[in-house]
Every structure is written in structure tokens, then in C-alpha cells.
Amino acid sequence: MWRNVLALHQVSQRAISTASRRQFANRVSENQKLFQEDNGLPVHLKGGAKDSLLYRATAGLTMFGTMYALYYLLVSSMPKKPN
């Protein structure tokens, strides 16, 4: 029993270690330069191709959803044909 408690204590200490295994580079200043650069692009497209793809996919889905809603609004406004 006591051995299990000691083992649990060791495992819990290892899991809550404050030392990081990998040091990440601080790239905040690089991102600030990228987003503050005056290159004529809106801020939501300054991230590159990934941002452009996400923007176009969102715009396309929005257009599709709007057309789909308008189509069903038109269909539901028509009177039903008697059988």
C-alpha cells in the first residue's frame, strides 16, 4: 500500500513539472512586423495563402447558404398544388 502511494507521488510530481521540454522561439515581433506592414492587404488576408483559402471558403459557404435560404423561402411562398 505504502509503495503505491510513493509511486503515485512520483508520477504526480513528474506530470506537474515546471520545466518545459522544448523551448519555443518568441515570434511576436515577427508577426507584428507582418501585420503592421502597409502593403494594401486587409488584415484578415495578411497571413498568406492559408488565410486567403479560409476567407474564400467562408465567403463561398456564406453565398451558398444565402442562396439556399432564398430558394426555400421562394418554394415555401408558393401555394401547394392540389393532388
Image (tube, grey):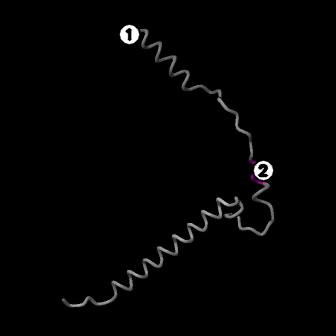
Q: Percent position (x, y) of residue 25?
A: 74, 40
Seen at 74% across and 68% down, the residue is 41
In this rendering, would 67 be left or right of 48? left
- Label 2 SS: helix
Residue type for callout 1: Met
Above or below residue 28? Residue 74 is below
Marking on residue 28? none
* Marks 1,2: beta carbons within 8 A: no
Tell me the residue that label 2 is attached to: 30
In which quarter of the view is residue 79 placed?
bottom left
Above or below residue 13? Residue 67 is below
In which quarter of the view is residue 35 placed?
bottom right
Tell me the residue that label 1 is attached to: 1
The magenta segment is 28-32
Seen at 56% across and 22% down, the residue is 14
Seen at 47% across and 12% down, the residue is 6
Q: Percent position (x, y) of residue 26?
A: 74, 42
Q: Quadrant of the N terminus?
A: top left
